[in-house]
Image: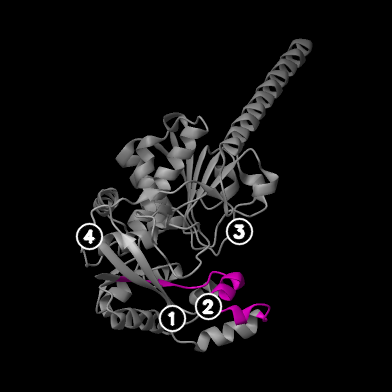
Amino acid sequence: MKRFAFAIHPLDMTDVARFEPKAANKRQSVVEKVLEWTPPYKLSHITGLRSDTGAEAEGWFIAVPFLPNQILSFQKEKVMAKILGAEKVARELGAGIIGLGGYTSVVSRGGTDVAKEAGIAVTTGNSFTVWTALEGAFEGARLLGIDPSEATATIVGASGSIGNVIARLIAPRVKQLHLVARNKIRLTRIARELTEETGREVVSSTELAPSLSVSDIVISATSSGGQIIPSEYLKAGAIVCDVSLPYDVCREVAQDRPDVLVIEGGGVEVPGGRIDLGFDIGYPPGVVLACMAETMILCLEGKLENFSLGLRISIAEIEEIRRLAAKHGFRLAGFRSFGRPVSEEQIGRVRDLAARSRQKAQVSGTRTRSGDGRRRWEAG
């Protein structure tokens, strides 16, 4: 039996309670101190994974007991010690490959620092995450009647490993591309390279609002800690694919902006219909995140080697994992928005509201132009 492991950590206090129910209703400061001194451990046994080819595998979720703010604020040596401890647990269980979930890949330079010390293969899952994000965003655009070749797109977190390669892949397919990130120097360089490579107009900015307000397609992939895209920034009729965990789009968007379709990026349907994760990750049965799926795919294929490592993801690896996913029967899962399935009625409502918004804008523009003309005539 082929074996894999996947390192995960809680994203917030709600997640902590899923990891350990006794932590519910405890003060965060107390919980963080307990997490700080808790070693990595086997969280659950994953069974029932069967490929369309007939190959089978089992695996484990390995808990890395840190919250995102701890991973980002503690000394790197302290965090790396816990991540490498998770790799040791995985190795002792017989896993041949471990996937790095959440911020464990961010803090380890795209997994390269872990791979240097690990005794088994390592992947970040970023290649399959990129593919599913692009597929989801373009499928959402199609359902909303958006023609990508006439659309403006924005990549939030464009200087990161996932955002960077998404920008490179999407640039030739859209009319105009906006790149947003905090690192202005790196962002400017990426924009210049993309303009030279594709001939497309590429705009770079460290401010979210100007780019999001004109964008039909938005893909957000940051490690900011979530809640950075408020409802007032978004254009009516836009498709927003949020790849980040915690999510970048503020939850208020669900209530305030019925004219925008926000989808969670990275949901993947596992083949066979029998997988038991042994732990509630907050997704429907048989659905996992793309980074988890990549680890499973590589294990089923017997490709127990480092994959998707570093700060610049290989387009060749993205194509390879796409091919292997199809071979083993992994598919893009149905859309979810703020934890709920997206219905056809919801998509239709977004289309209708966006159309009304465009009509109002056209009427308003006509009146303004007519008014300006009258004023000029009178002045003349």
For residue 55, side relative to residue 264 (left or right): left
Q: Nearer the viewer, residue 91 or 380?
A: 91
How many angstroms separate mark 3 from mark 2 (CA)? 18 Å
Which numbered circle lies on residue 227?
3
SS for dot 3: loop
Magenta stretch, residue numbers: 4-27
Give x and y (percent) for residue 37: 50, 89
In this view of the protein, can residue 98 be seen by the observer?
Answer: no
Residue 217 covered by magenta stretch? no
Q: What amino acid is at disc 4?
A: Glu
SS for dot 1: helix
For disc 1, the marked residue is: 79
Q: What amino acid is at disc 2?
A: Gln
For disc 4, the marked residue is: 301
**Marks 1 and 4: which is nearer the front?**
4
For disc 2, the marked residue is: 70
